[in-house]
Amino acid sequence: MPDALSKTIPIWCAVINRSLFGEMDESHELRTPKEVVGASEHVQIEALLPGFVGNVKELGLDVCSLRSVLKKPLRPSWVTHDSTFTHESIASTEYHTIICCMASRRVFGAELIGDGYIQGAGDDSEGWSNRLKPSLFWKHREQFLAAVEGNIPALIQHATITDQDRGTTITDAVKIGPTWLYIGTLSSAAQAEQYDGIIICGGSARSKPDQETNDNEENRTLDLLCGDGKQGSRALRSQLPRIPPFIASLPDYGSPPKILFVCPTGKDLSVGVALVVLCLFFDHSYYFSRHATSTSIDKALIRRHLATITTAKPDTNPSRSTLQSVHSFLMPRLD
């Protein structure tokens, strides 16, 4: 069983329960599958939980709001080929059951056989999912579940093309917490007139909408020349110094500027750039200043602001390279 199912998810369930449901002691227990996680390892993991809970508290999350959404604690449950559980036996009115499903059957020694099962080989969904996304699965789940396995790749392709033709791809920008910062995809920039400033991260120039812009709009747009993907994340490091003077140059209308950050996915480069602006131009109470802060920035502050972004936009997924570029730009300010 992958560590993600046997350890990571149980840890998160326990940490979330302790953070949001402090008075419900019975929900604070760490639950791990005994056949995979030994008693000694279980105790060692359990000893780390108070530190993890402390790290969550440092993020300054709106616990009351999160609890009002979640309503009940989380409890992991495991389903494998050897399980005899039914949906009724693991359902609960007191908990949200997180089902950790192991579809593969482990055959010890099979790794030595050419066509044997290799644990972890399916971790990267890009290699086997045929571009199937969770939202697409849930939208067409009845059709997928009723289909013959050999027909599923064609069904996924058809559903993907159909959704794109119908314009169901989400392009609306998302507002980040108590700020006037927004994150979206490149197509969100088509509504440029709604913003005081736009920062474009990645994407070829011809793919960006509304190329025939007037001088006023060009003055309100910063095009970071960083490309796409991992190379774009690395190139971002050299482009980040252009952000402070751009923010300072935006018109002052007596209120914080409304700024849109866009990139091809709306999940990676734009998130990193928005994170930089949050760290430089907003304090702990999210009060905006037109001049970059001169106080030191540490990893705790960066994590706190990143948590604000992910709370507002849960599908954000900044790459390691993007976050490394952000850290390398912000952390030297400690010297």
Image: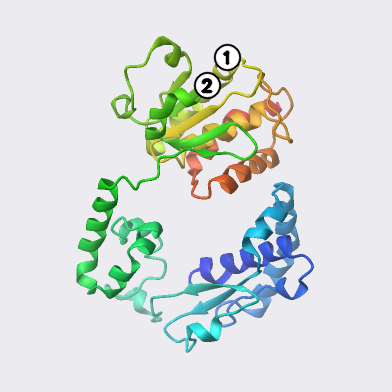
Name the foreground residue: 326 vs 113: 326
Residue depicted at 70% across the width and 23% down the height: 293
Relative to 191, is 311 on the left or the right?
Answer: right
Q: Is residue 232 above or below residue 192?
A: below
Q: Which mark is first along the chain, 1 or 2?
A: 2
Give the colouring mode of the picture: rainbow
| Residue located at (28% from left, 25% from top) | 206
Vertical placement of residue 99 versus 232, above or below: below
SS category of the residue bearing label 2? loop
Label 2: which residue? 196
Residue 41 percent coordinates (x, y): 65, 73
Label 2 packing within 10 angstroms: few (<14), some (14-19), many (20+): many
Q: Position of residue 196 (x, y in %)?
A: 52, 21
Would you say the residues marked 2 and 1 are in contact, meaning their CB atoms lie under 8 Å apart? yes
Task: Answer with left or right where residue 236 lies relative to residue 297.
Answer: left
Q: Which mark is residue 300?
A: none
**Where is residue 142 shown, x and y percent of the image?**
32, 70
The image quarter in which residue 145 lies: bottom left
Label 1 element class: loop
In the visual, does 33 lie left or right of 173? right
Instruction: Give the CA distance from mark 2 to mark 1.
Output: 8 Å
Front in this rendered view, residue 150 or 167: 167
* Farthest residue, direction top: 215
Which quadrant of the view contains residue 274?
top right
Q: Residue at coordinates 37% horizontally, 71% vertically from top-left?
A: 118
Residue lying at the far right of the rendered structure: 23
User: How many other residues sit within 10 Å of disc 1, few (<14), some (14-19) or many (≥20)?
Assistant: some
Residue type at the position of mark 1: Pro
Q: Is residue 309 visible?
A: yes
Q: Which residue is mark 1?
A: 251
